[in-house]
Image (tube, rainbow, N blue to C red):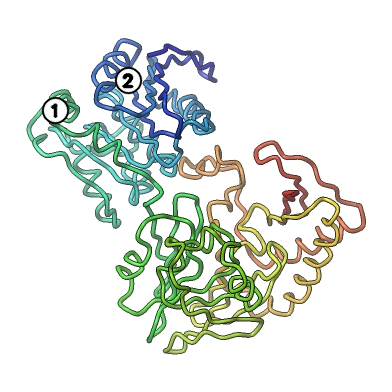
Amino acid sequence: MERKEWNGSQGTLVWFWKENEGTEPCPWVVCLGAGEEEAAACAALLEPQLPGAALCFVAVPQGGAALWEDDVADLVYQLRQNPSLDQAASTLTGSVSCADGVWSLASHYPQWFAGVCVVGGYADPYQARALKDVPLLVGAPAQQDTLLREGRVFSSAEVTVSGLRAVGARHVEVLQGCEGLSPEEAWNGAYSREGGAARWLLAQNRRGQFTVDWIKPGVWCINDFFSSCCYLVEGREKALLIDTGMGEGDLPALAASLTTLPVEVAVTHPHLDHMHWIDRFPKLYLHEKDIALLGEDRSRFPAAFQNKNAPLPELLPIREGSRIDLGGGVVIETLELPGHTPHSVVFADDAHQCLFTGDAIGSGDIALMICREEEAMELVARYRQALTDFLPNLPRLADYTWLGGHVIQENGGDPRRQQSYLQGRSQYFNPIRPKVVRDMIALCDGLLSGDITWTLEPIYQQYHCQCGCAGINFRFL
């Protein structure tokens, strides 16, 4: 176990690190302890129980996890850039002394963790609702139900679990045998070899997990580990799943848990994070030109099939004006908006007053254009024409709910800051709306005239340009 130091905004943060020696990205566990001695004790207890995992034991200094949370988050974010670590298999735990910090860090960064094990501690019960779709293993020892701290209520582990279940949490497990124990006794029991908490941490993986948000009656947003969004829309006779994301969980079973109707799939564009494992569904609506490409050579879309030799689903071609009738007056209309891909479409639902845009105009951050650099202006000109052709739809769609393919991006493109809204500290908010279309046309005009130029942005190493609330990133081939 290697002792390391992280220079943060509050000072020096000590942490102990064990690298996994395997060649494949491995699961990894972050454990918070109060000071170096306790962090080292946690390491001695847990390291033998976590074979094959990389381990990070953070020694939270005096002053507590709340004071040091930003520095701990910076450290975790830096580790997330390590290619030897499986970013879908990171989990979080902590000693009893740092249980409050575990609740807080997990509540503020739920998309970073495949699972959280916490024994005792007190959570802000409203912030903790961000964990409703995160697998939790919770030890609920003897505690006072609630505390008031500086005018805010904090709830015990038992009360927090009850609050999470009240908002639909589906993956909360309560450690058995903790009733009546002190928090320390409960923690030692959980992390004994018989307790199984360490094995539980290793079993968690975000690739198979989804979050589900109710948008309005008959419309749900399903988000996967890659922050790709698909949408389930109900009619009276059948339901439509718009895009399939790229999650590896049982998406058909999840859809069946939300609706009793038969489910068909419509895809906005055939990228791997929107058209994944389509062979699990019986019918697929896809732009007619993409269907032609799929029929010519299905190896063009390797992520589209869970079983590479599976028969194709029934392919139903769509184009501008195509209508998918779900029954009961729910009709999904296809509107072409190419640019991000040559045949991208969006779907308008007049019954629910929703517009499902995929990646056609971005999701609040940027629209991504993929091309050779010498072809960029030709692509911009074609995209401008497609946006102009789409303009007559705006009066009808002005009061609709616009739903993009990566909703988290309405909080910006910086993955370190995208979840800052959960702390009430977001510095960016840009939901997609009709103004994005108009500003995107102005951006295209500026690029074509030379008045707007792109600059290299550091996070994704893409070329970025902006006009008003519209942005474009170029990924050059």
Relative placement, left or right, of 398 versus 240 is: right
Q: In what quadrant of the picture does the N terminus appear?
A: top left
Q: Quadrant of residue 36?
A: top left
Total marks drawn?
2
In depth, the one of 375 and 458 nearer the eye is 375
Displayed quadrant of residue 298 = bottom right
**Residue 397 x %, y %:** 63, 76
Q: Secondary structure at mark 2?
A: strand
Q: Left or right of 390: which side holds 192?
A: left
Q: Is residue 208 left or right of residue 142?
A: right
Judging by the rendered image, the residue that carries numbered circle 2 is 33
Q: Amino acid at mark 1?
A: Gly
Circle 1 — which element? Answer: helix
| Residue pictured at 34% horizontal, 44% vertical | 128
Front residue of 230/313: it is 313
Which residue is nearer to you in this view: 461 or 220? 461
In depth, the one of 218 and 421 nearer the eye is 218
Question: Which of the labelled discs sits on residue 189, or is there none?
Answer: 1
For the point 29% across and 57% down, which residue is it? 168
| Crowding near the residue tagged with mark 2, few <14, some 14–19, many ≥20 C-alpha atoms within 10 Å | many
Q: Nearer the viewer, mark 1 or mark 2?
A: 1
In the picture, residue 18 is in which quadrant? Answer: top left
Residue 135 drawn above or below residue 257: above
Q: Position of residue 473 (x, y in %)?
A: 72, 50
Q: Amino acid at mark 2?
A: Gly
Relative image position of residue 93 (x, y in whole percent):
31, 31
